[in-house]
Image (cartoon, rainbow, N blue to C red):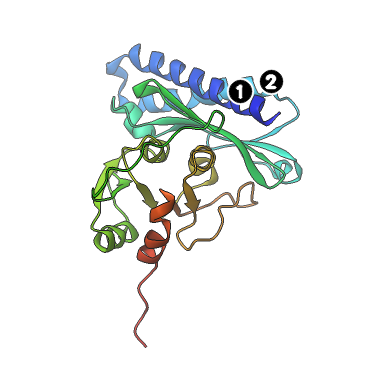
Amino acid sequence: MASTDANLAARLATEAGVLLLALRRDHDPATGTQALRDAGDRAAQRFLAAALAEHRPGDAVLSEEAPDTADRLAAPRVWIIDPLDGTREFGDGRDDWAVHVALWVDGELAAGAVALPGIDTTLASDPAAVVPAAAPGAAPRIAVSRSRPPAAALRAADALGAELVPIGSAGFKVGAVVRGEADAYVHAGGQYEWDSAAPVAVARAAGLHASRLDGSPLRYNQADPYLPDLLVARPELADALLTAVAEPARSA
């Protein structure tokens, strides 16, 4: 079933992305960028909610764009979705946005897909992506927020002599690591489960490290879906990054 679930996740994420591209192409600029962003959120949510209700009617769903209910906490299978990750980038006509579809089963992420419609790519947990080898001797590249790189990422860049690579959505940042265009993604300062579930499922399937910044596990389908920090990295960099991103010891 896991492979079938992964295939469904990839298909739905891809189809939602196609829908969003068409919506953006047909958008009337006179209505404004915010109207496009709002329309994208609504359209992708409607599509994914209807598709999951059709194909997995017994499963619960946690989505950024729908009211949360406590029913999912007792459910053995929960889809965790972000119908449009990177709404700002989508509205601005950029490529670095994504659609996230993940499945949590009995305590663990079981499947996931991240569609990157702007570059006509979907990354899935099955078949897992093959991460390109790092260039010998090259400085590490750390994907960070376009607007506010966290202090933890600045410490990591300083410690490892790394280059910061500003990218839009969380899914696109993790996708950059999976695709070999970055070596790590360091985030601090606020996310929710839907921001990272699908990207983490894809990253782990590809053999990458994924954890909280303190090295603790990422836990999903929690009563409070707030999951504020994230490290995704090539495994050979993980220990050095975890050390570097740790808060400096306070003076006595």
- The single residue placed furthest to the front in the displayed view is 136
Please tell me the numbered disc located at residue 8. 1
Q: Quadrant of residue 126?
A: top right
- Looking at the rendered structure, the kind of residue marked 1 is Leu
Query: Mark 2 sits on what residue?
Result: 55
Q: Where is residue 149 in the image (x, y as percent from the top left)?
A: 29, 52
Quick one: label 1, few (<14), some, or many (20+) residues within 10 Å? Answer: many
Instruction: Note whether residue 192 is visible.
Output: yes
Q: Position of residue 40 (x, y in %)?
A: 43, 24
- The single residue placed furthest to the top in the displayed view is 26
Q: What SS does tag 2 mark?
A: helix
Mark 1 and mark 2 in contact? Answer it, CB < 8 Å.
yes
Quick one: label 2, few (<14), some, or many (20+) residues within 10 Å? Answer: few
Q: Position of residue 120 (x, y in %)?
A: 38, 20
Q: What SS does tag 1 mark?
A: helix
Tell me if residue 87 comes above or below residue 47 in the rendering: below
Question: Does residue 163 appear to the left or right of 103 in the view shown?
Answer: left
Q: Which of 146 and 126 is in front in this view?
A: 126
Please tell me the numbered disc located at residue 152. none
Q: Where is residue 32 in the image (x, y as percent from the top left)?
A: 30, 23
- Looking at the rendered structure, the kind of residue marked 2 is His
Q: Nearer the viewer, residue 140 or 36?
A: 140
**Image quarter hosting the N terminus:** top right
Tell me if residue 236 comes above or below residue 15 in the rendering: below
Q: Quadrant of residue 98?
A: top left
* Residue shown at the point (44%, 51%) measured from the top left: 235
Instruction: Note whether residue 188 is visible.
Output: no
**Mark 1 or 2, nearer chain start:** 1
Tell me if residue 203 comes above or below residue 251 in the rendering: above
